[in-house]
Image (cartoon, rainbow, N blue to C red):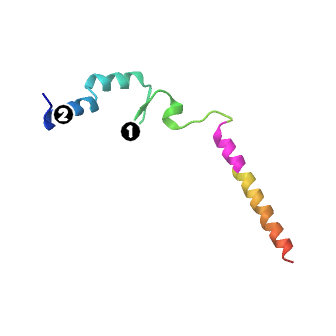
Amino acid sequence: MPLTPLECLCQVWQTLTPSVRDIVEQTQTNTVCTHTQCFLDENAAFGLLPRGSSVEMSALVLAVWMAAGWLFVLGRMTSTK
C-alpha cells in the first residue's frame, strides 16, 4: 500500500534529523568546538594552513601578475613617445 503524504514526510524527517545519541557522539569525537561548530582539529576549526601552502603560492601569483601589469604599462608609456 502506498504511503500517505504525511507518512512520507515523517519518514523523510526522521532520516534528516539527527538523534540525541548522534549529536552526543559527534561532540565527543570532535576535539575543537567554536560557538557554531565542532571540528576534529585546530586546522579544520580555524583554517590554519601548513607552511608551503596555497596562501604563499597565491601571494606569488599576485606579485607576478602585478609585475607583468607594471611592465605592460611602462611599455605602453615608452612606446607612445
Q: Secondary structure at mark 2?
A: helix
User: Which amino acid type is marked by label 1?
Assistant: Thr
Q: What is the span of residues highlighted in magenta in the rendered image?
A: 53-61
Of residues 2 and 60, the one nearer the viewer is 2
Q: Is residue 8 magenta?
A: no
The N terminus, quarter of image:
top left
Q: Which residue is mark 2?
A: 8
Locate residue 70, reporting x and y percent: 77, 62
- Write the residue at 20% across / 30% down: 11
Q: Is residue 40 left or right of residue 3?
A: right
Residue 37, given in percent of the width and then of the height, sits at 40, 35
Looking at the rendered structure, which numbered label has been put on residue 36?
Answer: 1
Q: Residue at x 66, y 46 (%)?
A: 58
Q: Position of residue 45 (x, y in %)?
A: 48, 34
User: Is 60 contained in the magenta span?
Assistant: yes
Q: Amino acid at mark 2?
A: Cys
Residue lying at the far bottom of the rendered structure: 81
Question: Is 53 drawn above or below residue 68 in the view shown?
Answer: above
